[in-house]
Amino acid sequence: MTEETVVAAGPPPIVRIVTQRFDHPDSHTLDRYVATGGYEALRKALAGSPGAVVDEVKSSNLLGRGGAGFPAGTKWGFTPPGVWPRYLVVNGDESEPGTYKDRQLMERDPHQLIEGCLLACYAAGLSQCFLYVRGEMALAQERVAKALNEAYAAGFVGRNILGSSFSVDIVLHWGAGAYIVGEETALIESLEGNRGMPRLKPPFFPAAIGLYGKPTIVNNVETLSNLPWIVANGADAYKQYGSETSPGTRMFALSGHVKRPGVYEVQHGVTTFRDLLYSPQFCGGIRDDNRLKMFIPGGGSAPWFFEEQLDLPLEARPVGAAGSMLGSGAIVVMDHTTDAVKACLRVVRFYARESCGKCTPCREGTNWLETILQRIVDGHGRPSDLDKLLDIGDNISPGPYPAASWTDGGLDAVPFPPRQTTICPLGPSSVAPVVSALRRFRPEFEAKITKRSVNIPLHVEREGTRV
Amino acid sequence: MARLEPANVEIAHEIISRYPRPKSALIPLLHLAQEQDGWVSDEAMVHIAELVGCTPAEVIGTCSFYEMFKREPVGRYLVNVCTNIACQLLGAEDLLHHAERTLGVRAGTTTPDGLFTVEDVECIAACTEAPCLTVNYRYFYKVGPSDFDAIIADLRAGRRPTRCAAEPGEDGEIPAHGTLHRVRQSIPGDRRAGNADPDTAGEPAWLGAGGAS
């Protein structure tokens, strides 16, 4: 199917795989899960060999939903042969600005995630599973804890699962508020009881040397939540949805200036940004029928997209070639009333706050970016500041930074991902909003510097006193 | 404010027993200390170091990295207003100013009666329901100034906020600061598969039957 026919025919039909139980108010209970076909995939898997599950998942070409988009079945195969034990660490610590889907999956269908964990452990020979839930998500922790207790009591988790030789414990672990722990090696550090600072990689990825120095598979919540459906219905059924290179469905959280913000599960690779933003079955357009100014296509770390990119399909490769990424499935939409400089500052401030401090270019650079942007917003900007912003960005992420094309402005797309002088992508993420906004809205920045309008916080103005 | 109480030591031992290496239990135990006292005291950190077999310096090293751990007392209710991009676009900064003005405190500080601490926080994963806030990590969606006032009035009066988050099946109870999840994982002894010790564990039994290597 070409892009044109999709647009002409409207968005592809809605298919619900991971969100299929969300409409039931008791979707988080074992009763509802079992009544709707839950743990059948586990029974089916246990009746066959672990290799059969690996083959099924590999054949489904399920792509990891954490951001890198690596095929899940292939990732399992990276564990070195003959090295035991192997661990499964579930990354439920996604804290990317705009990302909402993983919390919903844990709160509304924890058993689906648990079954996914069990299937992964069985297939890849993983001896223990740690389910790391983000610290701030109290309800998700409660629901997962309750679901695990139910599943243990019913014999789905623990020793000799359903009477077989398959035994694995799933341990609920919870974080304490650090964005960087969503990075897989930082997640492992945190799980070992340390400060969540990423480990140097390459050469050794967690699949080879991970938790306690042993082979470790780190999978995202949404990735694992797809497994029960794939094993129960088969890879061929899964591949009839989505595109050839990005099969199945994917969840996207749409927030910001749209009429109906929400989390939508759509067919992967064939649905376009325009479908999501404007189709009545999804967001239904920009609020007050305003003009679209820009949108973040894949969480705070992603370089911004504009109107020209609306017809791109939701698929990693074309989005990467166009200068950004789908990341964690978070789309933040901004209409023409948005102040690009303030929006840029707000995203940069996040990275400045969350930098773990391990790598100098990020620790120092993100704070400099924030300081300079803040003074521009406050009306104290200097003419040299704009080039300085780009220069600092270049120290964190050398060379041309990924950005969207802009035919009217004479700019060509620079493909994602960026190069980096840091261990993990947090530093380069802070450069994304700066380069995106400066390439496209430089006059807005310049106006703030030359006009010197002072940014007085609302509450100070109202009270008439300076605090 | 002190070391863990005997009942909590018991829970601590159970948590530690789920990990192949005791230090992995550090973050859950710090949460346990915070649940007991509402914050994490030096004495509690020394006790945790004894329990997991590391130095107190290592405990404070981990503790100080994570922003949910408070190393000084905070209010009974921790009001976290999200001002990250999705919420900012829909008026989060005004909401934060309203919170500061209503409660008479700056973000990061506590009201004199010890009831409320206001914080300006990063994305709390409710972006489609912006602007949002959490009280002791319980969500409130699409919060306007009058909603905020109603939530505060309910909490002051000791009531469950009537305007509670919309997650299906949620009861609206807001436990005191420190208590995160009210349900603990408990693994019955006869159902435990056991830890996979990184030094001694071998090939899992179910692979022996053939299949994946």
Image (tube, coloured by chain):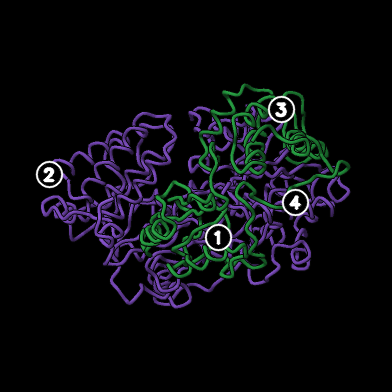
The front one of A236 and A409 is A409
Q: Chain of mark 2?
A: A
Residue A462 occupies which quadrant of the picture?
Answer: bottom left
The reply to whether discs 3 and 4 touch (Cβ–Cβ < 8 Å) is no
Identify residue type, mark 2: Pro
User: Is disc 1 on the same chain as disc 3?
Assistant: yes
Judging by the rendered image, the residue that carries numbered circle 3 is B51
Judging by the rendered image, the residue that carries numbered circle 2 is A383
Colour purple maps to chain: A
Q: Is residue B167 visible?
A: yes
Look at chain B in the picture and name its colour.
green
Query: Spatial distance from mark 3 to mark 4, Cα to Cα?
Result: 26 Å
The reply to whether discs 3 and 1 touch (Cβ–Cβ < 8 Å) is no
Judging by the rendered image, the residue that carries numbered circle 4 is A148
Q: Earlier in the sequence, mark 3 or mark 1?
A: 3
Query: Spatial distance from mark 1 to mark 4, Cα to Cα?
Result: 23 Å
Residue A370 occupies which quadrant of the picture?
Answer: top left
Q: Chain of mark 3?
A: B
Query: Spatial distance from mark 1 to mark 2, Cα to Cα?
Result: 43 Å
User: Is disc 4 on the same chain as disc 3?
Assistant: no
The front one of A77 and A358 is A358
